[in-house]
Structure formats: structure tokens, C-alpha cells
């Protein structure tokens, strides 16, 4: 990436912590905006096939929006993203109890989680690094965890995210970014014209509380088969998901890897395409099923059902309670390393 990273004031929390915004630009008129509250992606501005630039993420213009109640827009979720059954788990013979903030289950790290703290931040070359120390016992989790998230915008139009963490005691960990994407930009009311492909032969079914059952099932012949590319408007309203139809599903990536394409989203009208790559075993597709128009975002936009989609790279949900799932346990002396990139193909 060429050019400097600019740093701006973005407000102050009620506790008096200053929040900064970092603006990264590349040679192709792509712009990434990050804030230190929640290590959040606040905006990604991308040209369309005609060169018109639009923000392709949902979110808020000011800090107040992020301080208020919202569905994790653009934040880093942790210590454990996604759900933990009944807010309990046993690790090395010890039972731990967490807050249940999503019906009977624990979601995205608990009542506050990593997403509602101001992270320490620094510019390092062409990257922005955010750091947060989670105390032993925070939200009920064992061990002091030191987490770092580093964002880079490349001249290949890639938003590259590197997550690292260490711990003083064995603990589950599963970090992800919860950005909501709409490749049509603010003028596109829904994601129905988006065509999505996910390279997953299997998925993890869920119960009525959106919790994984422990099964790993083939997508063949189901509504969860997205391998060939599916227009979301032709499928999303038929997908059962509690009281709000749509996807809220973990897909088991067939070939995880930094260079392997695990998901692709294309918006024909704008010509924008987003490619997702990760070294994690799963990716959660969430189609904003519970947005209802009451949340007001950037430029006064009202965010309605299916107005955005999330592709949250991760370990399978509730892995700490499912021994047949890939492990999410981090132990002292080990380093958690999660790499994800969102690449925007223009025109």
C-alpha cells in the first residue's frame, strides 16, 4: 500500500477513553477505516465497475452508534465468537460458567466481550495493530489472554487480518470479525441480488436456539449447498432459522488455507466481487435475519432484514463442548494464529 495511514479522533467513551479512527488507502481508490473501539471495521469503500466509490459495509458514522446496542457490526468478537451451550464448559476437569446473553446460550464473548472495549493501537508500517489484554476470569473465562489483531490494506485490494493470542491458563479462544457486507453499497436495500459461493461440502446443523447439535452433515441436496453459486434472493427466505428465516450457519470449509478460496460474493449490478480466504476450519454465513429497520446506521440508513451478510471465519461453534469438532483450546506456551483476508475484485 502506498501513502500514509491517517489517524483521527473518533470520540470518547463514557469512561473517558479516547477512540481513534485509522484511514488506510491503496492505489486503486479502495479505503479501509478502522476504529480502536472493538478493533472494528467501520467502513470499506470500494469502486464499482464504473469507478463510483461506495461503502460496502453496514455500521455507524459516529461512536455513539457503536456504544449503543447493535448486532456486533464490524467488531472483533471474542474471547469466543459464536455460541457456547448454556454458558458452560469443562476444561481439564474444571467447570466454568459464563453469562448467557443469547437466550439459554453464551454469544460472542458475553455481556461485554472483546467488542466493547477500547483496544490499544499503533501504526506499524502499512498496517494497524490493535492489542487487548483480557483479564483472568473476565466474563468467566480462565487465563489472562493477550490478543492482537493486525489489519493491512494491500494494492491487490485485500483487507488482510492477522489475529494472534497467548494465554496464562488453558482457555477456549475463537476470534472473528463480524462485518456486515452489502456490495451494492448504501443504495442497495437488500442482499437478494448477491450471488454467493461457499466451498464447503458439509455444515453443522443447529437446533431451535441456533446452537450446533454436534452433527456434521453433507450439504448435498439441501438448502445449505452453496458450492455452485446461488442468488440469495432465490434461497434465503426458504432457509429455516427460528422466527427469522435466513442463514445463520457454520460451513465446514473443504480446504482451509491462506491461499484457498473459501467463499465468494458477487453483486452483478455494481460488478463488485469479494473473495474470502482463511486458515480456519469454518465460516459462518449470517444474512442479518434479525434486523428490522429500527437500527439507524450510516447517513441515516435504516437497516432492515437481509440488508447485509456476514462471513465470519472461525472454529466451529460450541467446539469447547463438542469433542468431534476441531479444538478451540489455547494453552500456555502456544500462540493462537488466525489469518483471514477479504479481497475485492473490481469491475
Image (tube, rainbow, N blue to C red):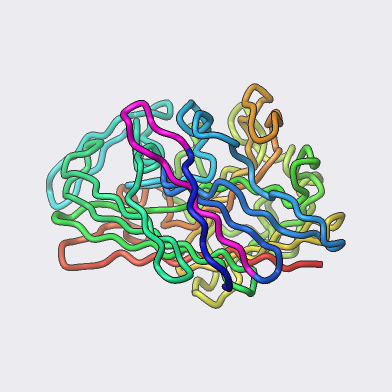
Residue 201 visible here: no
Horizontal arrangement in the rendering, residue 308 relative to residue 167 (left or right)? right
Residue 5 image point, x, y percent: 51, 62
Camera-nearest residue between 175 and 82: 175
How far across and down, in percent of the image, does residue 16 sit? 32, 31
Q: Name the residue at 41% across, 62% down.
A: 123
Q: Is residue 15 magenta?
A: yes
Q: Find the residue positioned furthest to the bottom.
A: 259
Q: Quadrant of the C terminus?
A: bottom right
- The quadrant the N terminus occupies is bottom right
User: Can residue 111 be seen in this snapshot?
Assistant: yes
State how many labels appear: 0
Q: Is residue 105 above or below residue 330?
A: above
Please state the horizontal and vertical placement of residue 169, each as a whole percent of the image. Answer: 14, 54
Q: Nearer the viewer, residue 2 or 265?
A: 2
**Vertically, is 127 above or below 114?**
below
Is 235 magenta? The answer is no
Instruction: Report the magenta residues as a range.
Output: 11-26
Q: Residue at x 33, y 63 (%)?
A: 164
Task: Give 11 or 287, whichever is nearer the viewer.
Answer: 11
84 over 2 or under it: above or below: above
Measuring 76% from the left and 40% from the top, which residue is drawn there?
190
Amino acid at each position: 500500500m502506498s501513502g500514509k495511514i491517517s489517524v483521527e479522533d473518533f470520540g470518547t467513551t463514557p469512561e473517558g477513553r479516547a477512540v481513534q479512527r485509522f484511514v488506510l488507502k491503496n492505489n486503486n481508490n479502495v479505503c479501509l477505516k478502522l476504529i480502536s473501539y472493538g478493533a472494528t471495521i467501520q467502513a470499506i469503500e470500494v469502486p464499482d465497475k464504473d469507478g463510483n466509490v461506495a461503502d460496502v459495509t453496514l455500521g455507524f458514522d459516529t461512536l455513539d452508534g457503536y456504544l449503543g446496542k447493535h448486532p456486533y457490526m464490524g467488531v472483533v468478537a471474542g474471547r469466543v465468537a459464536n455460541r457456547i451451550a448454556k454458558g458452560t464448559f469443562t476444561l481439564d476437569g474444571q467447570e466454568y460458567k459464563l453469562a448467557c446473553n443469547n437466550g439459554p446460550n453464551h454469544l460472542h464473548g458475553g455481556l461485554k466481550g472483546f467488542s466493547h472495549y477500547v483496544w490499544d493501537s499503533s501504526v506499524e508500517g502499512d498496517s494497524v495493530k490493535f492489542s487487548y489484554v483480557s483479564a483472568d476470569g473476565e466474563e468467566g473465562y480462565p487465563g489472562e489472554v493477550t490478543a492482537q489483531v493486525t489489519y493491512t490494506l494491500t494494492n491487490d485490494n485485500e483487507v488482510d487480518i492477522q489475529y494472534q493470542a497467548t494465554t496464562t491458563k488453558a482457555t477456549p479462544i475463537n476470534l472473528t470479525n463480524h462485518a456486515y457486507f452489502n456490495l451494492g453499497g448504501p443504495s442497495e436495500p437488500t442482499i437478494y441480488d448477491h450471488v454467493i459461493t461457499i466451498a464447503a461440502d458439509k455444515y453443522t446443523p443447529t437446533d431451535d436456539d441456533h446452537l450446533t447439535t454436534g452433527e456434521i452433515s453433507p450439504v448435498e441436496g439441501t438448502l445449505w449447498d452453496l458450492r455452485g453459486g446461488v442468488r440469495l434472493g432465490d434461497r434465503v427466505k426458504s432457509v429455516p432459522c427460528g422466527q427469522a428465516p435466513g442463514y445463520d450457519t457454520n460451513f465446514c470449509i473443504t480446504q482451509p488455507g491462506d491461499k484457498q478460496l473459501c467463499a465468494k460474493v458477487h453483486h452483478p449490478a455494481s460488478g463488485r466481487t469479494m473473495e474470502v480466504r482463511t486458515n480456519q476450519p469454518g465460516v459462518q454465513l449470517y444474512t442479518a435475519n434479525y434486523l428490522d429497520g429500527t437500527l439507524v446506521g450510516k447517513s441515516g440508513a435504516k437497516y432492515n432484514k437481509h440488508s447485509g451478510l456476514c462471513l465470519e471465519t472461525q472454529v466451529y461453534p460450541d467446539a469447547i463442548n463438542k469433542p468431534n469438532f476441531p479444538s478451540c483450546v489455547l494453552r500456555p506456551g502456544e500462540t493462537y494464529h488466525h489469518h483471514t483476508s477479504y479481497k475485492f475484485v473490481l469491475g
